[in-house]
Amino acid sequence: MEYEKIKQLMEDMGNSKISSINIDFPDGTKISMKKESQDTAINYKADNMPEYKEHTEERTIENKKIIKSPMVGTFYLKPSPTSAPYVEVGKHVNKGDTLCIIEAMKLMNEIESDSEGNVVQILVKDGETVEYGTELFIIE
């Protein structure tokens, strides 16, 4: 399933009264989305998607991985304004750990780490708008 189709599905769900949806496509792609209160994060999962990764994109520079945004939206380091950030510089993260939230079309999307290592640098400020492919973190 293509990124634009997923983006449209998320937008349609955000504008509807539906609170959750599970879709299994013939090609093996599975999409599960759940809409909660605006202050609560939504964790979504999409399997078998060759054109679009479930987690973030990454590239390697000198044994460091650059984690990129998988979507357009607003970058948040914390689940709520009064909470502690998911990660800080120097923190060790494992594969699958939540790094941040990106709010897209009124849906809060948890972005998980694709690799293990220490957070060397956070490249985006909390509350900043990001584009698809914006570099978010450096992990070593």
Image (spheres, helix red, strand yellow):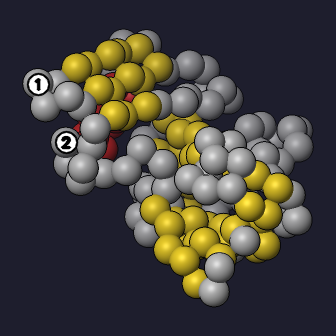
- Find residue 91 and report its image quarter: bottom right
Which is closer to the viewer, label 2 or label 1? 1
Alpha carbons under labels 2 and 1: distance apart: 11 Å
Q: With respect to residue 69, does 38 lie above or below?
A: above
Eyeballing the image, is 80 above or below 133? Answer: above
Can residue 38 be seen? Answer: yes
Vertical side of 2 occupied by 91: above or below: below
The residue located at (83%, 48%) in the rendering is 85
Residue 128: x percent and y percent? 63, 64
Residue topped by disc 1: 26
Q: Do the residues labelled 2 and 1 touch (CB within 8 Å)?
A: no
Kindly identify the residue that appears in the image at 50 percent across and 74 percent down.
59
Pointer 1 local density, CA inside 10 Å: few below 14, some 14–19, many at least 20: few
Numbered badge on residue 43: none
Q: In which quarter of the image is residue 120?
A: bottom right
Mark 2 neighbour density, 10 Å: few (under 14) some (14–19) many (20 or more): some
Q: Which of 83 and 70 is in front in this view?
A: 70
Q: What SS does tag 2 mark?
A: loop
Amino acid under label 2? Met
In this picture, is 31 found above or below 20? below
Q: Where is residue 76 in the image (x, y as percent from the top left)?
A: 68, 51
Q: Name the residue under label 2.
A: 1
In terms of sequence position, does the residue under pointer 2 or pointer 1 come before the other?
Answer: 2
Q: Point out residue 60 in the picture as x, y percentages from the top left corner.
A: 54, 77
> Is residue 134 in sight in this rendering?
no
Kindly give the residue lying farthest to the left in the view shown.
Answer: 26
Three-letter code for the amino acid on which mark 1 is drawn: Pro
Mark 1 lies on a secondary structure that is loop
- Horizontal side of 6 relative to 138 (left or right) equals left
